[in-house]
Amino acid sequence: MLNVKENLIVDFSPSLLEKFSEIVARYPEGRQKSALLPVLHEVQAVYGWLSVDAMDKVAHYLAIQPIEVYEVATFYSMYFLQPQGKYMLEVCRTGPCCLVGAEKIMDHLEGTLGVKEGEVTSDGLFSWRGVECLAACGFGPVLQIGPEYTFYENLTPDSVDELIGKLKTEAQAKD
Amino acid sequence: MGRKLLLTHIDVPGIQSYSVYKAQGGYRSVDKALKSMSPDDVVEEVKKSGLRGRGGAGFPTGMKWSFLAKPEGVPRYLVCNADESEPGTFKDRYLMTHIPHALIEGMIVSSYALGAHTSFIYVRGEMMPQIRILEKAIAEAKAAGYLGKNILGSGYDLELYVQPGGGAYICGEETALLESLEGKRGNPRIKPPFPAIAGLYGCPTVVNNVESIAATVPIINDGGEEYAKIGIERSTGTKLISAGGNLAKPGVYEIELGLPVEEFIYSDEYCGGIANGKKLKAVVAGGSSVPILPANLITKTIKGDARLMTYESLADGGFQSGTMMGSGGFIAFDEDQCIVRNTWNFTRFYRHESCGQCSPCREGTGWMEKVLYNIEHGRGTTNDIDLLWDIQRKIEGNTICPLGDAAAWPVAAAIRHFRDEFEWHINHGQEAQNRNYGLAHYADPLEVVTES
């Protein structure tokens, strides 16, 4: 059963639909379901998460059943089924990163942002969570921020503070 | 200096771009293959090279290609496995970031050899920057006439696409990857049939790792026999090693197979020793799933020979006193690291990444994680070590895909070589609870004993 508390009614823009059709064109006739993962990435990049309405509309677009979309969205760790902070800081918490201090970085994030893993700060700007191996073990500790999944490597508490400050400034500039 | 075949031009400014890559001799293998070789000739060169799959399994690539079914009127596919997510391994990300055209060139040559006209590079979704880099490189290659219809006037057509994953380690398993590429959950398929017979969309398919595909470029350029001259015995060519953990100079290194492990760790050309002047305690040599070895066994075999970076030498001694090359994810642990905490961490990874299809893996990984969590946090009981041993034995070999083995082996090896650390945690509960971030209390591994 989908553990979804909120729904967001969406209306895909013409440019998003154009991206969908470019993706579908990669696969053989009748194999448009292959587009599901990339299409969900595109939807999440626009809305920040996948609402039931968004998933239903993806199912309709790809001519598959809604359950086929839910199965995928719940299986893969990159898809969010509820709203997150504007910036989701994902810290690698797997062995090699922990050997060089990832746990300290997560503790520092929790202290600095004042929210626990998976929560959203009151200003709606930040969420954070630990994720499994990000394939950057030689440059740990690392974190990534979607939707571009920019990497920040060799983290220290100071560099994390600097990053948060930069993101706050960036968010203010956009408002 | 060791010879480099894949990272030769890594330091050339702008090597990410088509024009610079081409100016450095890029795409010669495509010119050669399409103009003067038949697809079977290409397969033959790869067979002669002795290249073994660089993703972890080490199966001979040429032989894998020769298994591909070729029924008339049915499309064949080449799928590149770029779902790199084995803890400790980051070589493919590095290659795709810095020399994307090496992969594109290899994809064209390999697709030609296999008779594939549509090929996919399945990249783990978190590598969005690498996905953008590859898409740009593909567009450049297409504009230069190396992709699309009638490549170089040879009559050969090829379209190449990048497919993002969704963040699931299991999709590095080839049949799970194909399920994912078909837009489904990444649940591994039962084999047989193997992908060579029924792969993507039920059609004959080869799935190869990024590094394996990139290695076909020097093989075609210089010939398989030249490639086979590098390395030792059945470990031919060069290998990318991702070095992480407590090393002075972590990073991605291209080595000639046969390099002594000790030289790799301590030489300035490679890792430069252990960070902060500390002592080496243990090494995971081939990604988190391969057995951990204490320092004395990673540099020398149980017979006292120097341990070499080859498939055979790393495996010398079996799982009693050896390990595996795996994907080349080399993780070094200094004397302050806690093996119990690391084992718990790795097991949490496998619990998180189990697709849930097979009961032994779905239930066993979670059970092991709970037991290890308790031991690590000073709440272990005297029979927990035996319990862990029992659970991992019941997972190994009892699942559809190798994720179960990958979860079982680190636990077995940690108990085999560092049993005293587990016992310490169990016997010093309060002290274990008061530690911060797993600081160690035991630096010396047990002597190796052979199990009956």
Image: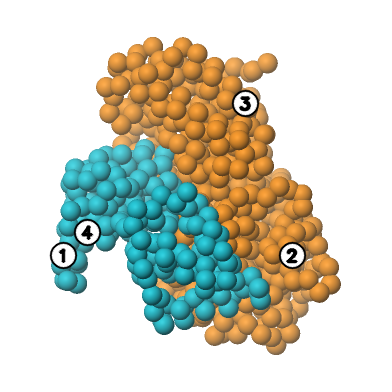
Chain colours: A cyan, B orange
Mark identifier at residue A169: 1
Secondary structure of residue under mark 4: loop
Q: Residue furthest right?
A: B72
Residue beneath disc 4: A125
Mark positioned earlier in the residue sequence (2 or 3): 2
Residue at image mark 2: B203
Horizontal side of residue B35 vs B125, given as left or right: right
Residue B422, quarter of the rendered image: top left
Q: How far is the residue under mark 1 from the one under mark 4?
A: 11 Å
Q: Disc number at residue B393? A: 3
SS for callout 2: loop
Which amino acid is tagged 1? Thr
Label 1's element? Answer: helix
Q: CA distance from mark 4 to mark 3?
A: 46 Å
Residue in the foreground of this view, choosing between B440 and B180: B180
Label pair 1/3, CB-CB below 8 angstroms: no
